[in-house]
Image: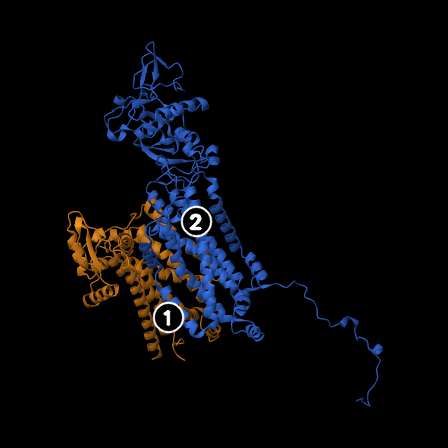
Chain colours: A blue, B orange
Amino acid sequence: MANSNEIYIPAEKFRFTNRNDLQHDSKFSTKPVSYFQGAFRRFSKNKGAVVGGIVICFLVIFALLGPLFTPYTPAEYDQMYAYVSPRLNLFYESGLDFWDGYKVVENSYSLFLKDRALAQETGREIIKRNEYEVSEDGSTYTYRYDTYFGVGFGKYKTISPEEFLDIQRYQNETGRQVLYPTVMVSKRPTVEKNKYDANIYYVMVNPNGSKITPKLDLNGNIIPNYWKYEADSPSPLIPEYNSLRIEGEDGIWENGKQYYYAYGRKIDGGIEVRAEYYEYYIYEHTQKAKYDYDDVTEPLFIFGTTNTGKDILACLSYGARFSFIFATVVAVTNFIVGVIWGSIAGYFGGKIDLAMERFTEILGAVPSMIIISLLKYHMGPSPHAHMLVLFIAFFATGWIGMAGRTRMQFYRFKNQEYVLAARTLGARDARIMFKHIFPNGLGTIVTSFALAIPSMIYSETSLSYLEIINLEAGSITSVGTLIAQGKDAIVNHASYVALFPCLFLTLMMLSFNLFGNGLRDAFNPSLRGSED
Amino acid sequence: MYMFKYVMKRLGLMLFTFIIIFTMCFVLIKLLPIPVNVLPGQDPEIIYKTLEGRGWITNIREGANGVWDYDRVPILIQYGNYLKRIILHGDFGIVTTYTEYRGHNIWEVFTSHMPPTVLINIYSTLIGVPIGLGLGILAALKKNKWQDQVINVFIILLISLPSVVLALLLQYTICFKLGWFPLTMLKSNAYFTWPVFKSMLPPVFALCLGSIAGYARYTRAELSEVLTGEFMLLARTKGLTKRQAISRHAMRNSMVVIFPSILSEFISVLSGSLIIEKMFAINGVGRLYLDSINFQDYDFFMLLSGFYALIGLAAGIVIDISYGFIDPRIRMGAK
């Protein structure tokens, strides 16, 4: 119905009062920041967390690639090279007194002379730069001692006649001296503990005493006690030898007669020789078929060796690799089970929740040590069984925390309006749970996931330290076992055995803590903008 | 009344949980073969008779070539026998396979190993609580100043340092390099003499350094939150000095949360730290526990497992209950 008072105003007559006053919705000049973008931005502002993340990356890379830097595996050991100091070729060649494979020793006069004699015979720098300090009363000599060459000859070694020939072939091909002249049995020390010591090649002051002090000639030189024979009348006990000789091809001339040194002694089961262990090690690893698979060219232990002569770098990197893989697998399992359990308990609530809560409460109250020892009793002592024990035990108690956190997040979000809206629109329970509620709680849950990994590695380490769990098998080992060995090594002045695994563990815990704290803050939207 | 009901309910639940754990342990252990190790020159019949006397086996018979055979008593009946002896006589059995204490009464061996563990724990609490609280309070009062930064770095370092590493570091520096203390704790019962006390100090330090960091962090967080509360502003406007306001209002309020955690930690470390006990060779409960696992001395293991489970449960319940006693605002169980 038309209004009589209607005034007709044509459209053209309308105009804006002010052209500049256009009341459009103004566009945001900034880009919208999603939850995860914001979280990432907050995270990258936290320097500690970023550094922690980088260190974690390094540790993971070390665990994954570490085995490539060492030709050894934790299964290989060489008792001769027990407690060998760490040596990095870079520092060794530069001559710095650091990471060079030497260690400072305080020895008695006779041990000092023994090292000196060894250095003189083999031409190795066993006493670094030949520098030593004598204590005021002259009883102790302090010097830097090469733990690699200092091993010297070890004990007299018995090899087969074929090997004896093969070593000679090797010596002639490479020009390296493996075998050194041997000492006649009657001229060796008589005391039981020195009898088999192949390093005593010199004339001793008292061959029947327990001291191994060498007799010095008038010029203060060591007198070799080599077994020599006349060139034209070899003893039947001495195997034929025509390879490199330390005295030269013509032997030595004494009193107008030509003598040769004996480089071996025929005994039952082969030939007894004095082989310099360093050279023999190289020979063994490069020439013998059974060692062909390893890439060892010379003994070199970047992190040193343990009391059984295992390469620490190998033990540590294989142990770390196992720890990381194991912890991640357990954490993922815990995550999946915990999230499912927690979301059911949290979403449905009521009686279901109560029953589920009681169950987790009782399970969570069982000390994990009890679970582990009971499982250990039932599964037997093999390392693979122990691995399974560890997995079950960490799983049995680990998922409960995750479930509790998920449950709390579900309680927080399930009564919010948007969930109600989704339900009104007909969304099924599963959709509401995992599409609408779960992503909101993801931040907290991911943080606890990140913090679960170091705590699991730490538990695993402690349990192997306590020797409750023994994972030593083949190429699998644990950092905790290494720490336990390191503790014993301290009294043997080999603190590096403990140093490297402790450093690894500390760095890992520290960086995961920083990383986890950063993650927690980053996922907390209430901190948004607070740091600007 | 509400309080009483609540406490009773919690205690009942705790007992229920404990019985479940204890029974589960017992059943799982009894499913294992019985370890019988006969010493040379020992009559195996005596060992089997002992086992029969304890109610584990019955119907012993010696077969041909000296192999002994027996029937096992049903587990539930064994459990009944076991509980009856514990309740009526306080008898937890005798040590069977743990060589060092073979033939001793388990309960006596257990109690004789309590003092070192408990003493080290008490010393560590005595040192740790005041220092931890002090550092936390200082950090909260000087928030974001240099004192706070230094304490924070200290806290994060100590918290991240695994106790294995911390203990090893202490042992290496103060015991081995500097030689101030013996490497391990002396094996002596004279706990209150100077040499033994001195040898206990490194493990005490190792134990308390970790808890100092924990207390400091907790106190700092709680106190700095309380300090921002509006009632603090009110206290100041009423004319209280800063010191009065902090000590009478802020401290008390933050203690509501801190005190139960101290109590609970005290209880939970009563069981000792296995790592520190092993590192410093302390002749305590932790060592017994590790050895009973290794020797498969099942009766011993049962007692110690029960002890550890009980301690864990008690530590949890103490937090909940003490809240109600300390803070009148929290009325648990009230509608």
Q: Amino acid at mark 2?
A: Phe
* Quarter of the image where one finds residue A271: top left
Residue A85: percent from left, percent from top: 40, 38
Q: Residue furthest front?
A: B64
Indicate whether A57 appears above or below A424: above
Q: Please, what secondary structure does the residue beneath circle 2 have?
A: helix
Q: Is residue A523 left or right of residue B122?
A: right
How many numbered marks does the figure carry? 2
Residue B73: percent from left, percent from top: 22, 62
Q: Is residue B118 visible?
A: no
Q: Chain of mark 1?
A: B
Q: Quadrant of the C terminus of chain A?
A: bottom right
Mark 2 to mark 1: distance in Å? 39 Å
Residue bearing the label numbered 2: A322
Q: Please, what secondary structure does the residue beneath circle 1 have?
A: helix
Residue bearing the label numbered 1: B320
Indicate whether B57 appears above or below A101: below
